[in-house]
Amino acid sequence: MSIWGKGMVPRTPGSRLLIKGGRVVNDDQSVEADVYVEEGVVQEVGPNLNPKPPSGLTVLDATNKLVIPGGIDTHTHLQFPFMGTTSKDDFYTGTKAAVAGGTTMIIDFAVPQKGCSLIEAFNKWKGWADPKVCCDYALHVAVTWWSDKVHTTGIFQFHEVVPQKKKKSADNLHAWIILHEFNGKGSRLCKKLLAMGITGPEGHALSHNEDVEAEATHRAIAIANTVNCPLYVVHVMSKSSARMITNARNEGKVVYGEPIAAGLGIDGTNYWNEDWAHAAAHVMSPPLSPDPSTPDFLMNLLANDDLSVVGTDNCTFDTCQKALGKDDFTKIPNGLNGLEDRMSVVWEKGVYSGKMDENRFVAVTSTNAAKIFNLYPKKGRIAVGSDADIVIWDPEATRTISAKTHHQANNFNVFEGMVCHGVPVATISRGKVVYHDGVFNVTAGQGKYVSRPPFPPYVYERVKQREESDYLLDFTTIFTENHKGSALCPGAKLILEEEIKYLELSPVEY
C-alpha cells in the first residue's frame, strides 16, 4: 500500500486507488465516504472502505476535503488558427493547465475555413489533439459557411446522425444547435468608430454593445422554439442576453445558457485601461460587459439555474500577438484565458460569496455539461461505474492567480491578483493521479477522445414529448459522429442559414 502526502504524486499510473476520509459531493447530494477506483473506473463509494489486497493500492488522504467530479470545460479554442496567428495554448499546455485547475475534460471547437469540409476540419483538430492531450476531450464542429454541400454532410459534434423512429427521410433528422450570439451590424459600427479615430480596445466594446448580443440571442431562441429545436447559447456576456435566456426557460423553452469564467470574474471596464496591452488582453467576442455589476448578475442567474454551465472560451494570445491590432482594434486577436482558473473563480464568486452551495458548484462546472452533451453518468458524477475523473478540493485553501505562476502558455492572465478560496489538491483522470500539490504526472497523448451518443435524455425528453403531442409543426436536431452523408432537417437548416447571413456581414466573428 502506498500513501501519498503533500508534494508527492505517483510516478506510475497504478490501476487501484483509494480516496479516504473526504466528503463526496455530487450535484444532488454530499456524503461522507471513501471512493475506490480500479482500472480507471469507480468501483465502490461508501464509508470505511478497505479493499483487498492492500498491495498495489495507492491511498490518497482527503480528510477535511471535498471529493468532486472532475470539471468539464465546454468551450475551448486550443491551438486555434485565428486572425493571422495561432492561440498560444496548444492541446498539451492547455490540458496540462486544465488538470492543474481541476478540469478533467474539455470540449474544443473545430472551425473549418469557408468552403472547407466539416469532416476534414474534425479530422484535422483530432489529429492535433490526440498526440498531445493530457485529459479527455471531445469536439464541437462550427458551421462557418452554408451551402447544399454542408446540408448533405451533417454537422456538429460528430456523433452519428440517427433519425427518430417514424421518420422516413434525412430531412427529418434532429439538430442540436450551439449558438455564438452576435449580429453582423457590429462590423458597420467598427468602420464608423475607426473613421472617428477610435482605434484602441475600447472601440471593440463600443462596437459590440449588449443590445447586439441580446438581439441575436432573441432571434435564435425564437427560431429554435418555432421548429422545436434545443438551443445552447455559448459565452453569455450581458444582462440583456441572460434575461432573454431566463425568460425563455421560464416559458418552458429548451434553452441553455453558458456564461464563462471571465464574464463571472471580471468586467469590461478593462477596455479603457490606460495600458494598451492590458486593455487588449481582454478583447474577446462578445466583449466583457462594461457594466461592473454584470458578473454578479450572471452569477446570481447561474446559482438559480437560469444559466446552466460555465465554460471559458479559452483562446489565449500573448502581448505580441495582440499587438497585431495596435492601430486598429478590429485586428486584435480575440480571446483570453480561463481554462486553468475556471473552477477556482466559480468557487470564489459563487460558493465563497454565498450565492450557491457545493452541490450547485458541481452542477455548473461538471454535471450539467455531462448531461447536456450526453457524457453522463460516465462523466460528471462520482458513482459506481463512472469514469474516475475526480478532484480532491480544499475549500479552505487560497491561492492568488498570476501569470507568473499559472501553467498556461500565455504571458498575461485576466484574473491577475485575484485571491481565490477553493483550490484543487489532487486531480485524477481515468484513475491516474495527474496532479497533486503542485506536482504533475502527465504524458502527452494520455487523454482520450470521448465519443458521445446522440439525443441526451436531459435535453430530449421534453423535445420528444412535444413532437409526439404535436406541440410544434417541426422538430429538429443534429448530432454527428462518423457521419455518412446524412442531411440536416429543415428546422436546423433554417437556423443555420439565418445565422450564416450575419457571418457574411461580420467575417471576424463566427
Image (cartoon, rainbow, N blue to C red):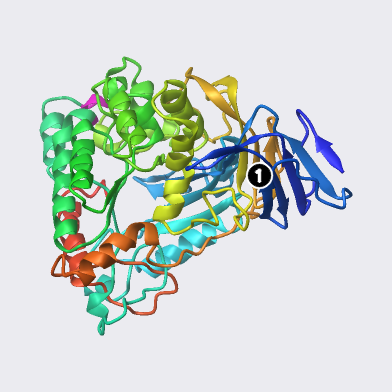
Q: Quadrant of residue 246?
A: top left
Q: Residue at x 22, y 43 (%)?
A: 245
Q: Looking at this view, name the residue that lies furthest to the top.
A: 274
Q: Is residue 344 left or right of residue 170?
A: right
Q: Position of residue 174 (x, y in %)?
A: 28, 69
Q: Quadrant of residue 238?
A: top left
**Does 484 appear above or below 456?**
below
Please state which of residues 456 and 71 is positioned toward the viewer in this rendering. Answer: 456
Please state which of residues 119 and 103 is positioned toward the viewer in this rendering. Answer: 103
Quarter of the rendering occupied by the N terminus:
top right
In the image, what residue type sits under mark 1? Ile
Kindly tell me whether residue 77 is visible in this rendering: no
**Does 136 appear above or below 324?**
below
- The verdict on residue 267 being magenta is no
Q: Give the SS element for disc 1.
A: strand
Q: Is residue 93 left or right of residue 256?
A: right
Q: Position of residue 218 (x, y in %)?
A: 15, 46
Which residue, given by chain and number where applicable, does mark 1 sit on?
428
Q: Residue at x 55, y 57 (%)?
A: 378
Q: Is residue 14 left or right of residue 214?
A: right
Q: Position of residue 140 (x, y in %)?
A: 40, 57
Q: How many marks?
A: 1
- The verdict on residue 201 being magenta is yes
Q: Position of residue 263 (x, y in %)?
A: 34, 31
Q: Magenta residues, as a range?
A: 199-204
Label 1 environment density (alpha carbons within 10 Å; few <14, some 14–19, many ≥20): many
Kindly tell me whether residue 139 is visible in this rendering: yes
Please state which of residues 404 and 433 is positioned toward the viewer in this rendering. Answer: 433
**Does 357 appear above or below 213?**
above
